[in-house]
Image (cartoon, grey):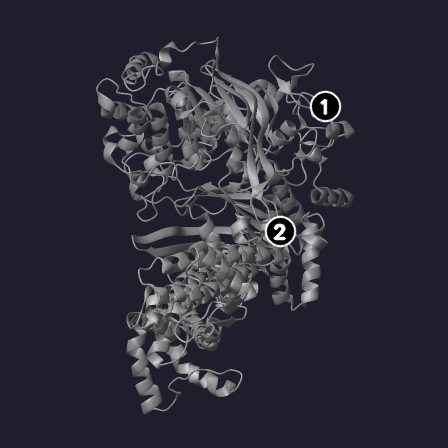
Amino acid sequence: MTTVTKPDPAPKDPVSTDPFLSVRDLYVRFATEDGTVKAVDGLSFDLERGETLGIVGESGSGKSVTNLAILGLHNPRNTTIAGEIMLDGQELTGASNRTLERLRGNKMAMIFQDSLTALSPYYTVGRQIAEPFMKHTGASKREGRARAIEMLARVGIPQPQTRVDDFPHQFSGGMRQRAMIALALVCDPELVIADEPTTALDVTVQAQILDLLKDLQQETGTSIILITHDLGVIANTADKVVVMYAGRAVERGTTREILKAPEHPYAWGLLSSIPRLTADVDVPLSPIPGTPPSLLNPPSGCPFHPRCAFVEKVGGDRCSTERPQLPDGRGSACHLTTEQKRDIFIEQIQPRLR
Amino acid sequence: MSEEQQKPSLEKGATADAAPEADKAVPAQRPETGERLLEVTGMRKYFPINGGFVFQRRVGDVRAVDGIDFHIDKGEALGMVGESGCGKSTTGRLVTRLLEPTDGKVAYAGQDITHASRRQLAPIRSEIQMIFQDPYASLNPRQTVGNIISAPMEINGINPTGGREKRVRELLETVGLNPEHYNRFPHEFSGGQRQRIGVARALSVNPKLIVADEPVSALDVSIQAQVVNLLQQVQKELGIAFLFIAHDLAIVRHFSQRIAVMYLGKIVEIGDRESIYVKPRHPYTHALLSAAPEADPDDKGRERIRLAGDVPSPINPPSGCRFRTRCWKAQDLCADEEPPLIQLGGSSEGHLTACHFPEEPTVTARAEDIILDPALAGAEEAADKTL
Amino acid sequence: MLRFLTRRVLGAAVILVLISLVTYLLFFALPSDPALLSCGKNCTPSNIAQIHKNLGLDKPIIVQWWDYLIGIFGGRHLPLGNCPAPCFGLSFNNQTPVWALLKDRYPTTLSLAIGGSFIFLVVGVGLGLVSAWKQGSVFDRAASSVSLLGQSVQIYFIGPLAIYLLSYKLGWLNRGQDPSWGAHPGSSLTGLVLPCLVMSVIFWSNYSRQTRSLMVEQLSEEHVRTARAKGMGSRYVFLRYALRGAMGPIITIFGIDLGSVFGGAIITEATFGLHGLGNLAVSAVTQQDLPLEMGVMLIGATSIVIFNIIVDACYALIDPRIRLA
């Protein structure tokens, strides 16, 4: 990233090595009939080459919107985007549609959640896979078809020579998701964004697909952003994790740090509300009280404060008035002191996790 | 709310209910046989597929449930896990008699309800209630919460002391909602709150058995735990038996004392929690457990099994053992002969497995991972070579 | 596909036979006796009986209907003259076979229906597409008001207006004449442009509005988003992905509208003084010419049934998920 060419370089970001993808102070707002939805509210993260970043959050946390914004797939009629998205030194937020079209499906690709609705029912799987390849590499129809067969074989579709002419509805759910992956990887993209890629799948198929993604990544060196609500999905696939809540990143760290020593009360809540296969069944789950906030009118200060059990530890009305900042690198956006976080985690949270 | 509080309102309901159908509606006096609340034997449900050239005729069946046996004791929670299309939801609907079984027998409290008519079912309907997956689709948007929750009482002719409204307000409080919300509409509530309304509706008629079909899978992670805890509290405090249907193995384990694993319309393994999760014998149970995502980066001690492909179609299921097409231990016998659901040597009491070549009763990692998926196996072989 | 067509054609045949039975029964349940009409002033009961015998009216109605049905396929020898297959009976009015009259008039109506449909599909769908492409633009708003205006006028109002302006004043278009495709294909075409145009106007608004909303809906579909995520150009995505999805419903609406299309063609004929089925139907009704009424009715029903089969087949061609069986 050569920030010199930018008229307004982010001054608080003294990066020495340029990350492959860098998102800085991203704001995404939708105009709706009820008001402005602050879908993403000042989000920053980096992604290195060949690395997998997990973005974890519940519905409405802004995780999917962020990634649609990276690809420029939002509806320009009602969406405003501010901030900086740098992909391999190229600014994407203000880029022209033509530039983005050249990057999409080529340098950056996306795997969507529901392959039944995300693939067109009107064209064969082969054609849908070949299309971006033909467009971005100038390949002929014949070459495109050959490439589609090659990709289908690579993602483990049996008899790819015949299945290439099938329509999506003729595939089973797991096979369709494989075809979706083949479609995303057909141009050997350097960035793949996988938006809940296994949520619609069965458990055994989910495991196959996640492992497949990981293996393909090792082969190609692609960077992956894995969006999910399921902490179990990131445990074995992601290197780093960003936890999002109400359009903001509330915690950032390596997967191990987030799962083993989380700092933010929301991350604590998430971890202690999921049952584990080996946990003591007589200990009830510890849910997060309340419901996720509306992004039309998010809470002031820390967006998690209405559901947080530790507001009193901070004292005063700091949590409801002052927005906590998320430091660069490992850290969490919370007013608790580092010692408080550590003590609360060890004394109250950790015992619940085993 | 304790059981003592519940009792009077139940009896009240029973007598009030007697007016229109005096001959049938005496639930309190129905004969009770031991501890069994629900007994299902050889239950089948085939959905016909119609086709044909000029005239429509039956050309095949979707064998959604194909001969299953299980029972639920009073106050017990039986978990039912399996992947989509295994027939677990259909089982739930058969037990509540929303569907009529094609074959087999369903007995509730000793009474055969397999083909019972609406009239015969009337007194039982209030004792078996259902909680649905989708909290958005299962509540009528044009009805107030009060009406929704009191509807089962109305249908079953139950008039609790103090009136239905008082009871509804109590129920709202039980499930953690504000009794003041009596007159609100479902759209004013979040997903988790709606599911609480669904629970309150099921509780309104003091059921003895609740069939919960994926009750939390449509909810956000932080909300799931709220609803699971609520259901658990209901189960323990009111002594209600549950058939808890879900695909999430960890949640089923957390909730149920016994667990049945279904695959393509069959129960392949059933047993108490410990047996199923620690000492599973059926290869499919092993595969399911090893695939369950755990939020633990140090999860290396678990065995790793990756199946190939998807579940076959229930229209034309494989012969013999249905899992054989995806099983690493399958032999000729598996195709020829269907394995019976029996207690294997080394399994504990009540732990039944339907397998000719069962696995060792452990879930610790094997010397060699089982990778059946050709694409995965290829990629991993390539990776091993480069190392 | 063949299986589907065979099945649909068989089904259509059954429906048409039933329609013929019902209409036959209805017509003969009417209080007027056709014999009285052709009997003249010096009518005696024996005359009437003779006419009844000539017309075959002395037999039970169901037998009459059966003879009629057989006649359609095999022809009949009626006392008043020979009636070769397909025999729809002889017109009471001038004893000519009904089929000859229908054959003479059918091309006009069919040409109007097809030409009108072509124009309103092109104009309506085209307007809708441009509106969807430029949502919220001046064009979008203008198109919706213009097409609304089109829907609120009537053929018999804009017909004369169009003749006056486009034909009489400006001399751009022929004022409308019956086509004779075999003899003068060129003038047949130009003679039909104005009537077809006028007829199509009432359909514009519906099709442009439906197309616009279908396209807006399709553009927010996930598979369209996937196409964009692949880097396909916006025009390509619009035409190849979104339009493809909108085509099925448009064709369905067209199938439902077929009846109104034929109705519109008949009103247009009257407005432009063309000699089509509508014209024939009106004279048949006024002269109580039952065989002719039956003939017009059956030919109309047959056309609609056949076009519906074509529409369904098109739907299956567009959407691979529809299995034809």
Question: Dot 1 falls on which chain?
Answer: B
Question: Dot 2 falls on which chain?
Answer: A
Give whichever of B304, A43 is nearer the camera: B304
Quarter holding residue C162: bottom left
- Same chain for mark 1 and mark 2? The answer is no
In the picture provided, is A263 more to the left or to the right than B345?
A: left
Coordinates of residue B170 in the picture (x, y in percent):
27, 23
- Tell me, yes or no, if residue A12 can be seen here: no
Q: Exactly how many numbered labels are in the figure?
A: 2
Q: Secondary structure at mark 2?
A: helix
Coordinates of residue B356 in the picture (x, y in percent):
72, 23
Q: Secondary structure at mark 1?
A: loop
Quarter holding residue B235: top left
Closer to the observer: label 1 or label 2?
Answer: 1
Marks 1 & 2, CB-CB < 8 Å contact: no
Residue type at the position of mark 2: Ala
Q: Is residue C81 above or below residue A211?
A: below
Give whichever of A93, B120 is nearer the camera: B120
Q: Is residue C265 above or below residue B16?
A: below
Q: Which residue is mark 1?
A: B356
Residue A179: assigned label: 2
Residue type at the position of mark 1: His
